[in-house]
């Protein structure tokens, strides 16, 4: 019997934590009848954004690296599509798995949905992990990527029940939807012990000290000088009472320099981007987290750490309804109020959402290997 050829696609840092549990599960439970290929599109090309994460997650080096690098949305998407088409024609997989909502996700999904292998109407099955998340904000590039990918996928693997509801409301057939839980939490749970062995807190002088963690990278925040100035004003006010650690994303660093804004000083410690295990350690030990990231909203909920999301909306409402997250907006007043609310929420008690139990990768692997009928 021919092994099932499964191709896992990763493009940006959040994707790596999502493909890792799928790779582990297929390797540990289905290695005798599944062959796995990892494709890295190179959308995140800095070593701190990709290579360190593969090492920390104990993933093998990618079988294919498209090396697309940074560019406009259109150019980056086009580069991924062109490179990925060549990969499909050469590798001819049975199943393509895309994760998350970055440009690589939508680009590889489009190529998979339209390609013909071995004659007309024969193509790989397309599975989307983290399907059904919705912010209702189509000014977000990620929202467009989610909508496009879900509309053309054959198997939609969801992290929460509200994602199932979103897909059904959009007319997706229920038999395409599988609620499997959150693979990012699998990675977190599996790597916490390794993260505890990091020396990053000692290196940064934070061991045994109270501090808040800040991540800031979303274009809607950092590309707008007035909005960025307002966020920095809130950070400076918070830092008067609690030291803040801010690993500076390359995009944020470039915008700070362009706008002539200073983020450091006055109790705010700036550092280069952290590796995955380092980030887990500083997040778990933080008194609170201020972020505009999607994945960190989930990780803080799993860790029970107060989270303030610096956005007007979120595609992860389960972290608000059940977890530690508060949606604060981007004004100084809103951020300060959000921090107070997040602290109250954690003190009152929250819970980890359903199936965020560290076994999502196993359920995803089972769904992939059970997909016997490839699309016609």
Image (tube, rainbow, N blue to C red):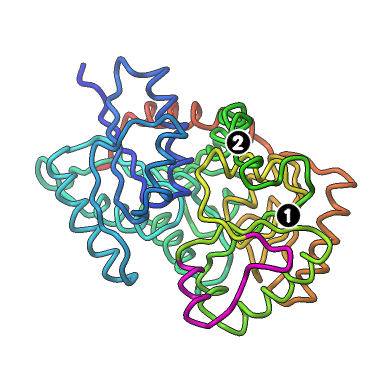
Q: Measuring from the top left, give residue 57's x and y in whole percent.
A: 46, 33
Q: In the image, is residue 228 above or below residue 4?
A: below
Q: Residue at x 52, y 42 (%)?
A: 276
Q: Secondary structure at mark 1?
A: strand
Q: Which residue is mark 2?
A: 199
Q: Residue at x 47, y 41 (%)?
A: 18
Residue 333 is situated, as x and y percent measured from the top left of the image, at 80, 76
For the C terminus, the quadrant is top left
Q: Residue at x 43, y 32 (%)?
A: 22
Q: Nearer the viewer, mark 1 or mark 2?
A: 2
Q: Nearer the viewer, residue 63 or 118?
A: 63
Instruction: Tell which residue pokes out farthest to the left in this image.
Output: 119
Residue 210 as seen in the image, left or right of residue 46: right
In the foreground, 199 or 52: 199
**Which residue position is annotated with label 1?**
212
Report the front residue among 90 and 178: 90
Asked if 267 appears above or below 23 in the picture, the reply is: below
Q: Position of residue 355 (x, y in %)?
A: 63, 34
> Circles 1 and 2: CB distance less than 8 Å?
no
Q: Which residues are magenta?
A: 251-269
Judged left or right of residue 5, residue 182 is right
Mark 1 vs mark 2: which is more N-terminal? Answer: 2
Q: Position of residue 43 (x, y in %)?
A: 34, 56
Question: SS at mark 2?
Answer: loop
Quarter placement of the N terminus: top left
Is 145 colored magenta in this rendering? Answer: no
Q: Quadrant of residue 193?
A: top right
* Residue shown at the point (79%, 48%) measured from the top left: 210
Q: Quarter-wise, where is residue 58 in the image? A: top left
């Amino acid at each position: 019997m021919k092994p099932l050829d499964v191709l896992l696609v990763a493009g940006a840092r959040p994707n790596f934590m999502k493909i890792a549990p799928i790779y582990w599960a297929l390797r540990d439970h289905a290695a005798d009848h599944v062959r796995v290929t990892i494709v890295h599109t190179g959308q995140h090309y800095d070593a701190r954004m990709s290579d360190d994460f593969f090492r920390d997650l104990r993933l093998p080096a990618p079988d294919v690296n498209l090396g697309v690098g940074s560019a406009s949305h259109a150019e980056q998407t086009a580069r991924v599509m062109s490179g990925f088409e060549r990969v499909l024609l050469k590798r001819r997989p049975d199943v393509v798995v895309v994760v998350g909502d970055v440009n690589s996700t939508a680009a590889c999904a489009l190529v998979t949905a339209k390609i013909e292998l071995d004659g007309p109407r024969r193509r790989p099955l397309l599975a989307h992990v983290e399907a059904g998340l919705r912010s209702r904000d189509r000014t977000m590039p990620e929202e467009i990527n989610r909508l496009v990918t879900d509309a053309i996928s054959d198997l939609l693997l969801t992290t929460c029940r509200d994602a199932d509801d979103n897909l059904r409301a959009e007319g997706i057939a229920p038999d395409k939807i599988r609620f499997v839980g959150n693979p990012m939490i699998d990675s977190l749970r599996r790597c916490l012990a390794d993260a505890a062995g990091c020396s990053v807190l000692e290196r940064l002088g934070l061991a045994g000290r109270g501090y808040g963690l800040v991540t800031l990278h979303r274009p809607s925040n950092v590309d707008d000088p007035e909005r960025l100035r307002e966020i920095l004003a809130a950070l400076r006010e918070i830092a008067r009472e609690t030291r803040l650690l801010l690993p500076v994303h390359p995009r944020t660093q470039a915008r700070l320099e362009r706008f002539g804004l200073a983020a450091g000083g006055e109790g705010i410690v700036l550092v280069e981007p952290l590796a995955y295990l380092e980030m887990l350690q500083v997040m778990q030990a933080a008194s609170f987290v201020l972020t505009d990231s999607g994945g960190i909203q989930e990780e803080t909920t799993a860790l029970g750490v107060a989270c303030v999301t610096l956005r007007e909306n979120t595609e992860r409402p389960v972290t608000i309804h059940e977890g530690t997250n508060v949606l604060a907006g981007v004004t100084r007043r809103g951020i300060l109020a959000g921090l107070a609310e997040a602290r109250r929420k954690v003190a009152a008690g929250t819970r980890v959402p359903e199936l965020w139990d560290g076994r999502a990768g196993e359920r995803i692997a089972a769904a992939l290997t059970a997909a016997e009928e490839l699309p016609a």
